[in-house]
Amino acid sequence: MLVIGIIFLLPFIWMLSASFKPEADVFKYPVQWIPHNWNVVENYRAVWFGDPPFMLYYWNSIKVSVMTILISVITSAMAAYAFSKIYFRGRDTLFIIVLLTFMIPGQAVLVPQFIMYRSLGLFDTHIGLVLLESFSALGTFMLRQAFMSIHSEFIESAKIDGAGHLRIFAQIALPLVQPFIATYAILRFIWTWNDYQAPLIFLRSPELFTVQLGINRFADATGEYYSLIMAGTCSAILPLVIVFLLAQKHVIGGIALGGVKG
């Protein structure tokens, strides 16, 4: 297991090592895992304060990710509550249709989405990118399983006391599924932050680029600067590492609860 773990870590270690080296040493053979010549400050200064404006791309990624998480959690939680606790005609059929949309590869709907966004004026905007990723069949499914674990007696008691579904959802159901909400929010953040395809297709203006597109700008007609690309990549994964370290208990706990109660 230790050997397998080290093998999986090798690409990350190489990336980190390359971000510390001068460009000429990146592909030296045999590999210098510990650089002989250090170029750390120059590389990271060129990434963060040079041209292209990596700091702007970083801010764009944070903005898009936070907005996507907020909207996605709200829409998925409300849909999940409706599919689990509100009885209406055709509910189960509609839920199956929602699940079926999860089976459709994202690439299959890119062209219709592109045409629709152009006609609605959402192309090349952050709002368009946020809306594109704010509605998730997987999130609805995950949170529906969580809401189904809440005993109906809680809901019925609240109804008897005169509470409507909106109040029951906000004040009773939502607090009871907080571990699942946290898990989904963290997973949504990781998916959105790492997404390369959607920004590539739906953004054109360089000032709107996210980190994943911004890293590409270290490669141009004159060549590819792998030391800078690796420094940018190390910078890009930093929020993911921080979020995981801070929230790993929620992720593991949420997945464990989902496995038991789902």
Image: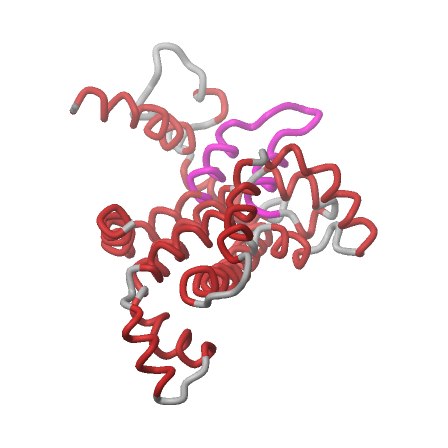
Count of numbered circles on the image? 0
Report the residue at 39% width, 10% height from top.
Answer: 29
Name above or below for residue 115 compared with residue 78.
Answer: above
**Residue nearer the viewer, 46 or 165:** 165
The answer to whether residue 188 is left or right of residue 94 is left
Main SS of the magenta segment?
Answer: helix
Magenta segment includes 221: yes
Point out the image quarter for the N terminus.
Answer: top left
Asked if residue 222 shows in the view, the reply is yes
The answer to whether residue 80 is left or right of residue 58 is left
Residue at the extreme top: 29
Name above or below for residue 116 compared with residue 229.
Answer: below
Magenta segment includes 259: no
Residue at the extreme right: 119
**Residue nearer the viewer, 156 or 172:** 156
Report the residue at 46% width, 27% height from top.
Answer: 22
Q: Which residues are magenta?
A: 210-236
Q: Position of residue 225 (x, y in %)?
A: 56, 28
Q: Position of residue 175 (x, y in %)?
A: 32, 72
Asked if residue 239 shows in the view, the reply is no
Figure quadrant of residue 15? top left
Q: Position of residue 9 (x, y in %)?
A: 29, 28
Residue at the extreme front: 89
Report the residue at 37% width, 70% height from top.
Answer: 174
Q: Position of residue 5 (x, y in %)?
A: 23, 26
The answer to whether residue 196 is left or right of residue 250 is right
Task: State the colouring used for the structure image.
Answer: secondary structure
Name above or below for residue 103 compared with residue 164.
Answer: above
**Residue nearer the viewer, 174 or 44:** 174
